[in-house]
Image: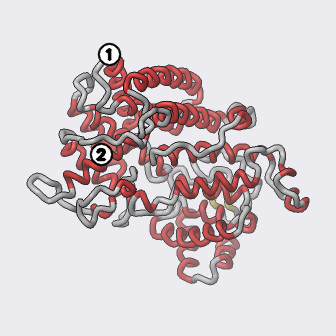
Amino acid sequence: MKSINFKKRLIGQNAHLQLLVARFIMIILKAPIPRPIFSWDMNHLIVGRPTKFLENFAFPRLRSSEALYRRCPLLFWAICAVPAPPAIRSQLEAQLKGLISDVLLEPPGSVEIVQALLILCMWPPSFSWNRHDPSLLYSGIAIHMGLQLGLHRPTLAREFCLDDDHLQAEPDSETKKTTWLACYTVSKMQVARSGLPLPFPEDSILITAFDDPEVSPDLSLLCHIYRLFGQSAKVIGTNGPSSSGLVDPITRVNMVMMFRFQFCTLWERLLPYKCNRLELSFLGARLQLWSFVLHDDIELSAELFDIVNAAEQDAMRLLQISCETNLSFVPFYVRRSICYAALMLVKLLRYPCIRSAHETIWDQIELARVSLSSSISPSDGDVNHGIDRLLQAAPYLESKEMGPPTQSRMTYSMVFDFIRLYRRHCCQPGPGALPMVGLEIFGMEHGIGPIEWSALCPF
């Protein structure tokens, strides 16, 4: 009972939350959770694997829950919230939001706070639609806090901490290095899903750290995957002379073919360490590279057909992996990747060179949708319901005219186009339109009106 009594002392000011957390602890003790984020016994919280994605963190050697809470309450509650059942998680999220507000008011923060923010980027608090997703903001705070703490120069702690007492309590350089690398990969994910350029300072020290022997192979490969993805997105999506930043069609095809070779080389490097997590990240990044040549201004050619076939294989493989994975505890970026792959296949159905039968593709999309929906929270405001409705509407939207394409949102332009298509054909009353059900998920509850581009954020 020692551990439970400790939790009661922590939250004694809130009796309802106290009971919820005590119940949560008993659930963890009595019922095994698939691949739990951490393991409980009656006295200790083991912090070796706070998340599947961030399991390569070199966390401070804090084994007791009391020590973890004293060191960083935000990290303590973030770890508690990730595997919690929805009813308990909603209560813990209120606690987390209050602690994050304190972080903004009390800089410079700590390495543990940066780690907590990264966990909350991967498993964000529940939100209704993308403009309310705090992940991009959290990752930005983590980056700037990391810079202020000197995580980008992990061996020069004395130059970023003038207080000798605080210096002795600083985490070691390995912890700082791996946390900074995690900042890098998470920030790449967050800007990609919004179609934005990366506001992250890349330098030779960061790139060299990718291959540091102290860094785990998984984390190293994730860094290489997202660096290559970021390079391709920047070169193709932001360096063009047009107002959108997109390079011209011929150059675009040539650049995609060049980066295709680099992705193939990286895949060979990844093979000895291949696992679902790495393969999902790799396929998701390469699918976004293929998306650059799926704009309507690209003429049909042998190169385009080759890329379409490669995109089809990658999307089908990504959906296949997702159907074999327990999606209950996956980071939210995995759900976005599944939705992206499904929409990519819908887009590819418009090309005459696609190899799989249309029925096979629709079956795979439906299997992925069912896998996603089976792990959706019953909350009516959950953005996952919006993803489910968009995929349900995909067969109806497949033959619809896209209209003026989105070009300035880099690899996520395709998703913006589908959301706009959904809004046009599934919101506007008229013959053949889908019913207006749950459209508040997309911020469309007030009808069609002029398109507000700031509201058309992808999932």
Q: In the image, which disc is placed on residue 302?
A: 1
Who's the residue at 82% across and 43% down the image?
155
Return the x and y of residue 297 as percentages of the image width and height. 31, 29
Residue 152 at least partly seen:
yes
Q: Could you tell me residue 227's position as x and y percent?
A: 58, 34
Horizontally, is 321 left or right of 22 in the view? left
- Upstream in the sequence, badge 2 or badge 1? 1
Residue 43 lies, in percent from the top left, at 70, 66
What is the x, y in percent for residue 364?
29, 37
- Camera-nearest residue between 54 and 296: 296
In the image, 267 versus 343, the foreground residue is: 343
Q: Which of the 4 quarters of the picture holds residue 439? A: bottom left
Distance Cα–Cα, label 2 vs label 1: 26 Å
Image quarter (top left, top right, bottom left or bottom right) of the N terminus: bottom right
Taking the image as drawn, is residue 279 in sight? no
Q: Is residue 133 above or below residue 201?
A: below
Density class for disc 2 (Cα within 10 Å; few <14, some 14-19, many ≥20) is many
> Which amino acid does the dot numbered 2 rest on?
Phe
Instruction: Check disc 2 and report its element: helix, strand or loop.
Output: helix
226 vs 167: above or below:
above
* Residue type, numbered disc 1: Ala
Of the numbered discs in the image, which one, if any, rests on residue 324? Answer: none
Determine which residue is flagged by label 2.
418
Residue at image point 33% right, 43% down: 368
Is 164 placed left or right of 413 in the picture? right
